[in-house]
Amino acid sequence: MSKKATSTKRERDPAATRQRLIDATVRLMLQQGFSATSVDQICKEAGMTKGGFFHHFENKEALGLAAIDWWGRMGTALYEEAWKDDSIDPLAQLHRLLEIMSGFTRRSEDAVVCMVGMMSQEMSATSPAFQAACAKELDLWTENAAKLLAAAKKKHKTRTKFDPVKVAWFLNSLWQGSMLIGKTCRSQELIRHNLKLARDYVDGLFEAR
């Protein structure tokens, strides 16, 4: 297929073209962050011209925000596997959630990284738009985990009083922090160990079954 035909096909499928830009942005920003990623690099990675870029996005910030939104929806779809079956014990659903998280460390030798976590660190202090976008995704993860904890609290006798939301924020913080340290120390095993400790902690909130 000629370059002209390929270009025409992309123009006829704006949603696919837009997604190509988002995919390229995610790949680059996970490797080198927002500031170090240029529009030229994104266009080259996506196989597009600058004209095509600006047809879909006003600027790099708009594309970065779209990438965070896509990442959040993609991640939530993966996590939803933990609680999609309402017949499963909520504590078992929490275990499944932690297993899914641990599974991310076994996909390859590459570091486990999170677009939301990376952009939170790099951009939240200087960009209200990025701060709000990242906070939205972190809030959603915490809300979903808190729902499972609250349901488990209703079903099982607890050993101690606890606030499901506060525990969910602890788990979220442990997850994000573990990815950061695992990337820096180049240790996937460290992340898996932390997630095992997280499971032990959650189980310790309840009486033995």
Image (spheres, helix red, strand yellow):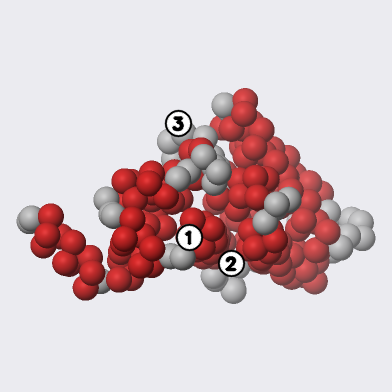
Q: Nearer the viewer, residue 187 or 151?
A: 187
User: Can residue 1 be spotted in the picture?
Assistant: yes
**Residue type highlighted by circle 3:** Glu
Name the residue tied to disc 1.
59
Which residue is pictured at 30% across the width and 71% down the height?
Answer: 14
Q: Nearer the viewer, residue 145 or 202?
A: 145
Q: Which numbered disc, 1 or 2, marks the residue that appears first in the sequence?
A: 1
Which residue is pictured at 83% across the width and 59% down the height?
Answer: 166
Q: Secondary structure at mark 3?
A: loop
Q: Nearer the viewer, residue 16 or 126?
A: 126
- Left or right of 39? Residue 103 is right
- Left or right of 61? Residue 129 is right
Name the residue tied to disc 3.
109
**Residue type highlighted by circle 1:** Asn
Say which of marks 2 and 3 sits in front: 3
Percent x, y of residue 202: 76, 51
Name the residue tied to disc 2.
83
Q: In which quadrant is the N terminus drawn?
A: bottom left
Q: In which quadrant is the C terminus drawn?
A: bottom right
Q: Is residue 151 above or below residue 37?
A: below
Which residue is pictured at 12% across the width and 60% down the height?
Answer: 4
Which residue is pictured at 77% across the width and 68% down the height?
Answer: 150
For the image, the number of numbered tags is 3
Say which of marks 1 and 2 sits in front: 1
Crowd band around label 3 with a 10 angstrom C-alpha radius: few (<14), some (14–19), many (20+): few
